[in-house]
Image (cartoon, helix red, strand yellow):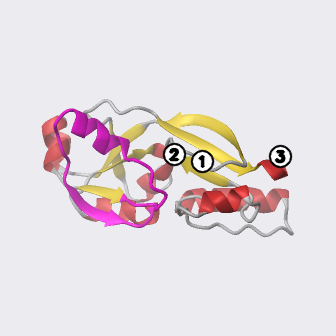
Amino acid sequence: AVPAIAGLIADVVERFHAEAPHARLEWIRPNSEAYPLVADGVIDIAHLGGDARLPDGLETQQMKPFVWLTFVRKGHPALKRWGMEEWLKWPHVLVDIANRVRNPVNEVLAAEGKERSIGALIPDFSGVAPLVARTNMLATFPMLSMQHDMQVYDLRVLVPPVELPPFPVRFCWSSRLA
């Protein structure tokens, strides 16, 4: 259970089949039921972003936390005066990956008494780059979610004008398989 990020899927499947050419890889969307299924051994491994509490029966491996970046289209008006005012002025794309992960961007803003405008709420990362490339929306996500598409869609990368905590990342699998 890992978010649908087209370039990441291609990289993982290519490596997977190089290592195990006769094996089958089934990539499923994360959802709130995925982690109990991992604990039961129905799903072999899952990627978990955020600090959500996991059910009993899982082993985990903490990975290097993700750093947040903001992505905009080439020629975006915000590039001229990049800062908090511009970041809050333009609508943002938000991805709802259905695993109930708290959004640290919104939490940090709320603590400062600020709020960003959400222009689009989409179900997975595969639609973020084309949307950002064709609109004046901003996307603030970890680099991994955008690293392949940012070059394809000629996006610009900016440091968000607010200090965002690194985003914790874990892989988890059933303790029975350990």
Specify which label sits upstream in the sequence, 1 or 3. Answer: 1
Badge 3 marks a residue whose secondary structure is loop
Give the quadrant of residue 129.
Answer: bottom left
Badge 1 marks a residue whose secondary structure is loop
Query: Do we see residue 81 in this rendering?
Result: no
Badge 2 marks a residue whose secondary structure is loop
Instruction: Specify whether 90 is left or right of 175.
Output: left
Residue range (magenta) = 95-124
The residue that label 2 is drawn on is 52
The residue that label 1 is drawn on is 54
Instruction: Specify whether 79 is left or right of 144.
Output: left
Specify which label sits upstream in the sequence, 2 or 3. Answer: 2
Magenta-span inclusion, residue 18: no
Give residue 49's position: percent from left, percent from top.
Answer: 52, 47
Magenta-span inclusion, residue 117: yes
Spatial separation of the CA atoms under disc 1 and disc 2: 6 Å
Residue shown at 61%/67% (left/top)?
28
Spatial separation of the CA atoms under disc 2 and disc 3: 21 Å
Identified by mark 3, the residue type is Ala
Give residue 105's position: percent from left, percent from top.
Answer: 32, 42
Identified by mark 1, the residue type is Leu
- Which residue is outermost to the front? 56
The residue that label 3 is drawn on is 178
Residue shown at 18%/45% (left/top)?
115
Q: Is residue 164 above or below residue 95?
A: above
Residue shown at 17%/51% (left/top)?
90
Mark 1 Cα within 10 Å, few/some/many (few <14, many 20+)? Answer: some
Q: Are marks 1 and 2 in contact (CB under 8 Å)?
A: yes
Give residue 23's position: percent from left, percent from top.
Answer: 83, 67
Mark 2 Cα within 10 Å, few/some/many (few <14, many 20+)? Answer: few
